[in-house]
Amino acid sequence: MEKNNEFVEKLVHINRITKVVKGGRRFGFSALVVVGNQNGKIGIAHAKAKQVPDAIKKANELARRNLVQIPLKEGRTIHHDIFGKDGAGKIKLRSAPKGTGIIAGGPVRAVCEVLGIKDIVAKSLGTANPHNVIRACLKALLKQNSPKNLSILRTLNTTTQVRSKKTRVGRGIGSGKGKTCGRGVKGQKSSSGVAIKSFEGGQMPLFRRLPKRGFNPIKKEKIAKLNLNKIQSMIDKKIISQTNILNLESFKKAKIISNTFNKIKILGSGEIKDKIDLSVDYISKSAKEKLEKNGSKINLKQKI
């Protein structure tokens, strides 16, 4: 362990790499290093070189550029028990009372020493690979919450409320959180925004009993349509009289239109010879022109 410019540098692991080429073997070295100021700051790095000193130097420089701050309780231990995982590396860290010391081995001891932790109990539960163990240890340390951080999250010492954004899973490949992600892979339920709650215990579900294209409106206008040639034909057959006012009721009484209709519209197909007195709801433009030319009277209940 070396102290340099208030930072402690500790070599965790060196690995020799052999590359077989035509002329023989070429050796390289990789170094795993932890750097810390023994006051909550730590950085880890891995570097390669042809010689061991060069690999260690490169790793130290890289670790100094990637320092992170870890909150410590009383400057000697962690605030609470934490669990960390990286790949196959799993580690459990537990806070300890004063005088316990560092009960840890290998890479975890190196991390605790450069970080400034004096009392801790650690247990590695997964692989013994130093790279995975050391990364799992750092992830666990970053997961802990200090009382200051918790007070900020609970908005006790600040007016701004910190809220973590909810992860929206199953929103397509572009979301980065999975395509269906827990919704299954087939059928209507796997689509976003679909929730089918229609089982009614063996009877026909309500949504299948309802019409597919909506309801028939209660106040729907039922408009009967009559052409001029039809009216002229009825006058010639003396079913209706041109002297009377021709309206919806008179047409219904003569049984020209059904009683289900509540309004009437006159259309301009054909010709009309006799003068008539009309009282209708609607009239087409061509029918109006022919009746006005004929000298008939038109009384519209509603404007076109």
Image: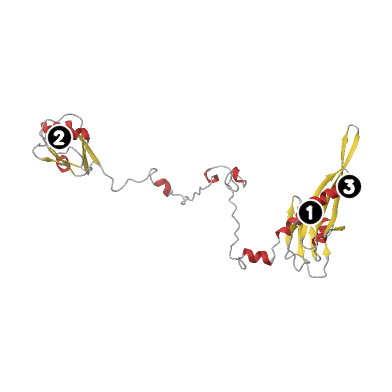
Tell me the tag on residue 64. 1
Q: Most extreme residue toward the right, as rendered?
A: 24
Residue 226 visible in the current orientation: yes
Q: Amino acid at mark 1?
A: Arg
Secondary-structure class at tag 2: helix
Front-most of residues 187 and 194: 194
Task: Answer left or right for 192 relative to 297.
Answer: right
Tag 3 or tag 1, which sits nearer the N-term?
3
Q: Position of residue 285 (x, y in %)?
A: 22, 35
| Residue 52, numbered label | 3
Find out whether the residues at labels 2 and 1 contact each other: C-beta distance under 8 Å.
no
Q: Earlier in the sequence, mark 2 or mark 1?
A: 1
The N terminus is located in which quarter? Answer: bottom right
- Within 10 Å of disc 3 (Cα), the crowding (few <14, some 14-19, many 20+) is some
The nearer-to-camera label among 1 and 3 is 1
Q: Is residue 138 left or right of residue 208?
A: right
Identify residue type, mark 2.
Glu
